[in-house]
Image (tube, rainbow, N blue to C red):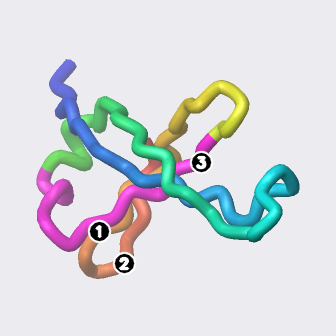
Amino acid sequence: MVTYEIAVQLEVWLGANANDPHGSSVPIPISHRLFAPATAGASVVPGAYLGVLYDPVDRRVVAQSLVTRDGAQLPL
């Protein structure tokens, strides 16, 4: 089975934190590798987006979908 490995660098902004008296947010850099099926490979181009969920407790990214330049959503 053919798959494509995609390496991404993300900055996760968690929003205001109860422990932060100024209410500011600090980005958290996250590195992640995901595997896309061969059917999605042709859509992994500049301008495409990844729909992801982020678990702040485990500091884990879960890829949900690949959104192509024309707006199609491909599940990952």
Instruction: Give the extent of the magenta segment.
Output: 42-54
- The foreground one among 64 and 13 is 13
Asked whether 34 or 36 is in front, the reply is: 34
Q: Which residue is mark 2?
A: 71
SS assignment at label 2: loop
Neighbour class for label 2 at 10 Å: few (<14), some, many (≥20)? few
Amino acid type for the residue under numbered disc 3:
Leu
Question: Is 51 in the magenta?
Answer: yes
Classify residue 48 as left or right of residue 14: left
Q: Position of residue 74 (x, y in %)?
A: 40, 55
Task: Identify the residue under disc 3.
Answer: 53
Question: Nearer the N terminus, badge 1 or badge 3?
Answer: 3
Q: Secondary structure at mark 3?
A: strand
Rendered view: 17 above or below 7: below
Q: Mark 2 or mark 3, which is nearer the start of the sequence?
A: 3
Mark 2 vs mark 1, CA separation in Å: 5 Å
**Label 1 element class:** loop
Do the CB atoms of the residues marked 2 and 1 lie less than 8 Å apart? yes
Q: Residues within 10 Å of mark 1 (few under 14, many from 20)?
A: some
Q: Which residue is mark 1?
A: 68
